[in-house]
Amino acid sequence: MHLLLTNDDGVSAPGLLALWRSLSELGHTITVVAPANNMSAVGHRKTLHKPLRIDPATLADGVTQAWACSGAPADAVALALKGFLQAKVDLVVSGINSNFNLAQDMTYSGTVTAAMEGVIVGVPALAVSTSARALVEYAPAASWARHVVARILERGLPAGLLLNLNVPRDAQGLVITRQGRRIYHDVIVVRQDPRGRPYYWIGGDEPTGEAIEGTDVWAVTHGQASLTPLDLDLTAHHALTELQAFADVA
Ligand code: MN
C-alpha cells in the first residue's frame, strides 16, 4: 500500500511528523507532499492563476524526506495524485491539524479540504485533527489515526466518502458521529497602518460548540475520539420538498 500524507499547517509542523512516525509502524510506503507554509483555513482553494512548485524538504525532525508544495493543501494533493507521483496512491491522510475540525469548520479547513481533494480524484481519504502545540501532545491523535488507517486499508471505504477524525488529548475511545454545530466568536479588530489607513484583523476567542449528543463537538468534549463520515453532496435533502414552491410560476 502507498499512503500520501499532507496537512495544512505546513511541511515542518509537528503534527505531520507525529502522523508520519505513527503510520510508519504499519509498514507501508509513505510519501509526504505538504504545503511549504502554514495554509490553515484556506478552505478548498485551487490555485489556477499562478504556477506551482514542489521542492524537496524535510519534516520537523530535519531528516525525514518530504516534498513542499507552494500551493494550498488541495493543490498539493491534486498535483501529487495527478502526475507528480508515479506510483498509485491508495489512501490520502491529512493532518494532524493543531486544532479540531468540527461541524462547520469543514468549510474553512485546509486539513479537511485536502482530504476532499483526494476523494474528488478518486482516492479514499482521512483528515485528522487534535488540539495540540508540542510534539508529545499529538501522540493520542497519532495512535487513533493509525487505528483508523489500518481499518480503512483492511475494509476499504465506499466511493466518494471521506472520514474526519478528531481526537482529544484525553481520548478514552472512538465513537462514530455526525457533524455538530459550532459557535464562532470572531471579532474584527481595526487598527491604523503607519500611513493612517485602517487595516482589519480577524480575532476573538476560540470557537465553542453546542453539546448535542451524537455529534463531533459532543464527542471531543466528552473525552472520545470522533470519526465522522463526510460526503461532498451538500444538498439539504430535508428542504427539497418545501423549496418546490420556489419553482412554481404564478
Ligand atoms: Mn491547520
Image (cartoon, rainbow, N blue to C red):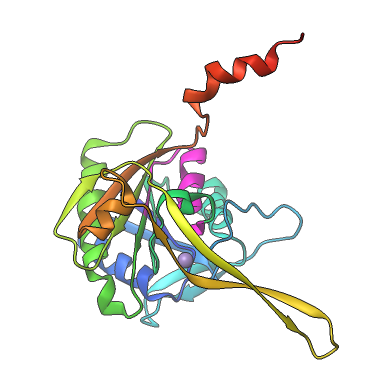
Quadrant of the image occupied by residue 23: bottom left
Provide residue 186's location: percent of width, then percent of height.
56, 66
Residue farthest to the left, as pictured: 172
Whether residue 83 is visible: yes
The structure residue drawn at horizontal position 62% and vertical position 62%, both measured from the top left corner, is 71
Whether residue 26 is visible: no
Residue 132 belongs to the span the image colors magenta = no
Q: From the viewer's perspective, is 165 left or right of 170?
A: right
Q: In the image, is residue 62 above or below residue 236? A: below
Residue farthest to the bottom, as pictured: 194
Quadrant of the frame with the C terminus: top right
The structure residue drawn at horizontal position 28% and vertical position 43%, both measured from the top left corner, is 177
Q: From the viewer's perspective, is 225 left or right of 195?
A: left
Q: In the image, is residue 118 above or below residue 63? A: above
Provide residue 24's location: percent of width, then percent of height.
25, 63
Residue farthest to the front, as pictured: 250
Quadrant of the image occupied by residue 240: top right
The structure residue drawn at horizontal position 51% and vertical position 40%, both measured from the top left corner, is 121
Residue 114 belongs to the span the image colors magenta = yes
Q: In the image, is residue 1 above or below residue 57? A: above
Start-end of magenta stretch: 109-127
Closer to the camera, 180 or 250? 250
Q: From the viewer's perspective, is 250 left or right of 53?
A: right
